[in-house]
DNA sequence: GTGCAACTTGACTGCTCGGTCTAGTTTTCG
DNA sequence: CGAAAACTAGACCGAGCAGTCAAGTTGCAC
């Protein structure tokens, strides 16, 4: 992976290629979108593409990296110096939903990457740090006694499960992934698919994640 | 879409093709897996493929339909005649997680189909009935006062949102999709990726969906 | 202005793809 | 049996693919 020196003009070209390709990949799929289509869509020759990227796959990976980096930055900015871990989780959730709303194409690329064995490892590697961070907040909330540790008034069935040790109740990493599942799913269905108000959906997501179906 | 009469031998061949293709699609991706690879993997000629399917795309759609039908049957069987709507939700969730655990390849295909514009509509159409069903249980639970309607002791932030009418708290369909997000995500990460015990993960998923992070 | 690195072009290559088609073989059934 | 229907093989086709390359052009440093 040799580095090239790019002039500012070159950097602009690269950004153009990545932005256009991301849109086409999302609309049309990664495989069905050819390099020829990407370059002709920008009105440039094929040589341009292979000047900036060594392969179509590398282009995709670079788009992925950039997107993950941008999302993470947004989350960090939103959380800031907030001392309350539960509130940090909420802020991160809202920031993610807002980012999802603004970057429909990139969310679609995440989804594709997760499904394709070839790209899944790269996706996971990029998410690891963010997940670890969120998990830290969850752990802290548990330590402060803000998150149930399994002794609360659960349904009979859940109580039995805890009693029998069949459940690692309050496993921080599992909870983090549950948050991820709720936010990505709700963003896809309600914000992207139906065009609903991102703030409203975020509100509902936060409420569900904090209180579940049964509320209190 | 003409129908063909198939002998029992023909039906067996068709099943073979679908099963093998599903595995290859999941392992290798839909586009990168060629028809030639599928037939040679089964040691048959290309004519066999196009005798049973009019195109590669139709094969995929048929696999999708079958999988959705099978999952739905599993959910219905699990729910049975259970009168308690909350318990019905729980049973459906558990049944889904068990099915996900057993059909990793098909779950991957769902994920791919969701990401590809070309297949997403078919996926959605198949899910509609199941979602409508689950939503019915949620509605019933709300009607029985089992599910929060927003007056409960939410966090300050959520309370404000409700007061300002910014949140359709307890929207049944949104809650259904939140359940879907949690179950598919946790299955992918913990059961498929890390090989954890499906029952344990299901237990944790149920607990999260019913009580959220804060439990109480 | 000279020279070199950054950038651009688009024809071209070798290959693989989804799908067709013809010439069969096997099964079913009257 | 005989004929029709179900099934199979695999050579073949035109299209389109990712990636290469030789021949430029542009812009900046000196």
Image (cartoon, coloured by chain):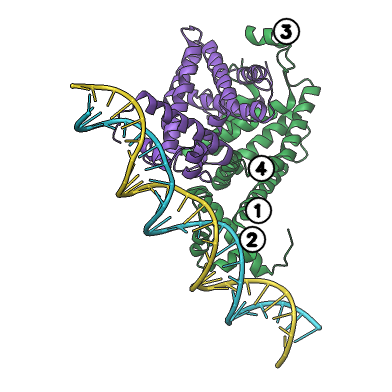
Chain colours: A purple, B green, C cyan, D yellow
Disc 3 target residue: B163
Q: Chain of mark 1?
A: B
Classify mark 2: residues with Cα within 10 Å, few (<14), some (14-19) or many (20+). Answer: some
Kindly check if marks 2 and 1 are in contact, taking CB atoms under 8 A apart as contact.
yes
Q: Secondary structure at mark 4?
A: helix
**Which residue is pictured at 69% across the width and 48% down the height?**
B69
**Mark identifier at residue B71:** none
| Disc number placed over residue B53 in the picture, else none | 2
Q: How far separated are the C-alphas under marks 1 and 4?
A: 11 Å
Q: Is the residue at mark 1 from the same chain as the one at mark 4? A: yes
- Foreground mark, 2 or 3, reads 2
Q: Secondary structure at mark 1?
A: helix
**Counting other residues with Cα less than 10 Å from the Cα at mark 4, is it few (<14), some (14-19), or many (20 or more)?**
some
- Say above or below: D3 vs C14: below
Nearest the viewer among B113 and B208 is: B113
What is the spatial separation of the Cα atoms under label 2 and label 1, in whole angstroms? 9 Å
Q: Are marks 2 and 3 on the same chain?
A: yes
Protein chain holding label 3: B
> What residue would you read off at disc 4?
B123
Cα separation, mark 2 vs mark 3, equals 56 Å
Q: Position of residue A195 (x, y in %)?
A: 68, 26
Q: Quadrant of the C terminus of chain B?
A: top right
């Amino acid at each position: 992976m040799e580095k090239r020196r790019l002039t500012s003009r070159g950097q602009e070209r690269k950004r153009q290629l990545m932005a256009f390709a991301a849109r086409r990949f999302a609309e049309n799929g990664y495989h069905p979108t050819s390099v020829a289509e990407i370059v002709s869509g920008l009105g440039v020759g094929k040589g341009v593409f292979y000047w900036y990227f060594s392969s179509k796959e590398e282009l995709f990976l670079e788009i992925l990296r950039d997107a993950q980096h941008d999302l993470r930055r947004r989350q960090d900015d939103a959380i800031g110096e907030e001392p309350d871990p539960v509130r940090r989780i909420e802020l991160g959730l809202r920031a993610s939903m807002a980012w999802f709303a603004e970057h429909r194409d990139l969310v679609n690329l995440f989804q594709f990457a997760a499904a394709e064995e070839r790209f899944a490892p790269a996706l996971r590697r990029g998410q690891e740090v963010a997940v670890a961070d969120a998990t830290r907040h969850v752990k802290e909330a548990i330590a402060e006694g803000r998150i149930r540790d399994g002794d609360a008034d659960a349904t009979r069935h859940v109580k039995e499960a805890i009693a029998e040790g069949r459940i690692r109740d309050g496993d921080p990493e599992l909870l983090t992934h549950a948050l991820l599942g709720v936010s990505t799913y709700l963003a896809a269905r309600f914000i992207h698919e139906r065009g609903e108000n991102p703030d409203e959906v975020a509100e509902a997501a936060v409420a569900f994640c904090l209180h579940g179906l049964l509320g209190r």
